[in-house]
Image (cartoon, rainbow, N blue to C red):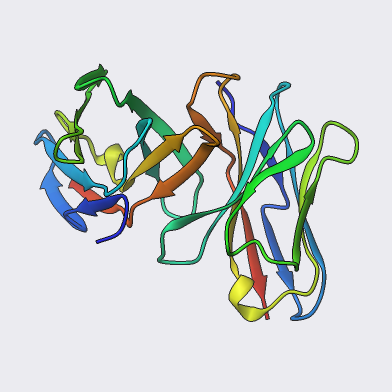
């Protein structure tokens, strides 16, 4: 698999349920960022977790990072229909490649009302 | 924080024509980026621009692409002779602050080459 691969590719849940998306990567990173994209729209930044952090929270979002396994997960609790979107993880190697993000294929989340 | 503003939101162009996509940062930042997303595919890095110079570019960013910040404000991506495979959403992005690491994206410019 390539840098920044998410699974599952698609996730369908009911409103109120939790949604968990996973991301794996191959090379060392400075940080990992999660983005949301509504169909045909721009990328909305959700949360950034640095390589020396293990867990981070923001509202209904919880992100974990396991650098030993080169993986991250995004948990959305108490999902809403408005959370329906594609979710991408993106890794930043840092250093001279500051801001050069490598994106995964994304997870398409559908939340049914 | 607000993202950048991109124009046009959608452009249709004939193959072989030149296209200029524009990006206007809301505030003064140092790092700017262009990314693209072909329909149904991953978002791909094209180029980073720092202090009015290209900092890094990908293999995609060949001689038909160029970037500049002509008036110190607008940040442009020029595609000299468009090909069908250049059809994609092009995103401008900026850093949050010099050491913030967070990258904020604009709404994108849809380019359709026919």
Residue occupying image coordinates x 63% and y 80%: B84
Q: Residue at x 19, y 40 (%)?
A: A71
Q: Position of residue A43 (x, y in %)?
A: 47, 42
Q: Specify the quadrant that holds the C terminus of chain A.
A: top left
Closer to us: A111 or B22: B22
Left/right of residue B13 with respect to residue A93 in the rendered view:
right
Residue B15 drawn at (x, y percent): 74, 81
B84 relative to B20 in the view: left or right: left
In the rendered structure, the answer to whether residue B17 lies left or right of residue B38 reads right
Q: Tell which of A97 and B91 is nearer to you.
A: A97
Asked if residue A113 can be seen in this view, the reply is no
Q: Residue at x 78, y 74 (%)?
A: B81
Q: Residue at x 22, y 50 (%)?
A: A110
The N terminus of chain A lies in quadrant: bottom left
* Any part of residue A92 in sight: yes
Furthest residue to the right? B71
Residue B72 falls in image quadrant: top right
In this rendering, position of residue B39 left or right of residue A3: right
Q: Position of residue B34 (x, y in %)?
A: 62, 48
Q: Position of residue B102 (x, y in %)?
A: 48, 27
């Amino acid at each position: 698999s390539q840098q920044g691969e998410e699974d599952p590719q698609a996730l369908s849940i009911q409103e109120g349920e939790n949604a968990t998306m996973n991301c794996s990567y191959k090379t060392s990173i400075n940080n990992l960022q999660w983005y949301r994209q509504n169909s045909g729209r721009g990328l909305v930044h959700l949360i950034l977790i640095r390589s020396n952090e293990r867990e981070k929270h923001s509202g209904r979002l919880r992100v974990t990072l396991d650098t030993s396994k080169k993986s991250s997960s995004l948990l959305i609790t108490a999902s809403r229909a408005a959370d329906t979107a594609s979710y991408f993880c993106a890794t930043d190697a840092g250093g001279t490649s500051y801001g050069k993000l490598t994106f995964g294929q994304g997870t398409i989340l559908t939340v049914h009302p | 924080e607000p993202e950048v503003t991109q124009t046009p939101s959608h452009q249709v162009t004939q193959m072989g024509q030149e296209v200029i996509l524009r990006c206007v940062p809301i505030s003064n930042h140092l790092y700017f980026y262009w990314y693209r997303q072909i329909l149904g595919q991953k978002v791909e890095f094209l180029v980073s621009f720092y202090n009015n110079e290209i900092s890094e570019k990908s293999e995609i960013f060949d001689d038909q692409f160029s970037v500049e910040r002509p008036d110190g404000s607008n940040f442009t991506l020029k595609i000299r002779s468009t090909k069908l495979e250049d059809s994609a959403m092009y995103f401008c992005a900026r850093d949050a602050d010099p050491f913030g690491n967070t990258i904020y994206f604009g709404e994108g410019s849809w380019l359709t080459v026919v």
